[in-house]
Image (tube, rainbow, N blue to C red):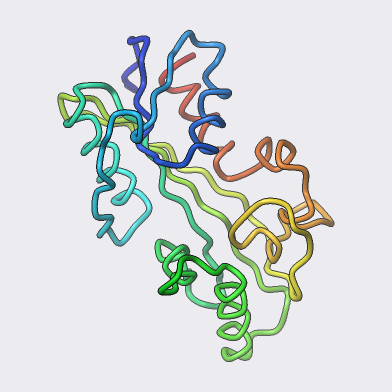
Amino acid sequence: MTRKFEGDRLLVATHNRGKLDEIADLLKDYNVSVVGAAEMNLPEPVEDGTTFIENARIKAHAAAKATSLPALADDSGLEIDALDGAPGVYTADWAETPTGRDFGMAMQKAYDEIRATGTPPPWTGRFCCTLVLAWPDGHDEVFPGTMPGRIVWPGRGDQGHGYDPVFQPEGYDMTFGEMDRWEKNRISHRADAFAKLVAGCFA
């Protein structure tokens, strides 16, 4: 049976202010105050897992242990079927440059690698998000979410972030990059995982 969240303070193991605000908004009906890793002066742990679950667990347990608060972490990325699931957990790594992340370069790399396989379109794939809620005693609950879709080229739209311009979610004629941020958040892989988290631990 899923463990219920019974406290009134939740640590979100992220240094990303936008993600923190998004999570606080999703939990506003449950009388939970949300605090971020940056406010607690937590370092970012090394994410050396090979799956989304492993990386989310690393972040959640490190934060819970350091603060004695329940901690929520997520790990997410894009899986492309023509590339056997790549970039997957290395989604952000594909964008790394000596001067910061360049997602234009990462999207070009994804397209070039798909073309190199000779796979004809449609190029199916999915965005994945795994949420882990960890308690200081070492217990955790895991909630995976997905948004299926396909890769389009060239990319369209300047909303969102990351690979959003080249990802067209299933059932829609626009890319995440063309979608209003809140519309995307309502249907995204993270929304899927959050619905399961809320139903399992907060409802």
Residue drawn where x is 36% and y is 15% of the image: 9
Residue 53, given in percent of the width and then of the height, sits at 34, 48
Identify which residue, 59 or 202, lies in the foreground.
Answer: 59
Indicate whether 43 appears above or below 153.
above
Residue drawn where x is 41% and y is 66% of the image: 90
Residue 110, given in percent of the width and then of the height, sits at 57, 77
* Picture quadrant where residue 180 is located: top right
Residue 190, given in percent of the width and then of the height, sits at 55, 41
Identify which residue, 62 or 117, lies in the foreground.
Answer: 62
Tag count: 0
Residue 58, given in percent of the width and then of the height, sits at 25, 46
Residue drawn where x is 41% and y is 20% of the image: 201
Indicate whether 40 appears above or below 179.
above
Q: Is residue 200 left or right of residue 162?
A: left
Q: Is residue 148 left or right of residue 71?
A: right
What quarter of the picture does the N terminus occupy?
top left
Identify which residue, 106 or 89, lies in the foreground.
Answer: 106
Indicate whether 152 appears above or below 111.
above
Residue drawn where x is 71% and y is 62% of the image: 165
Residue pushed farthest right? Answer: 173
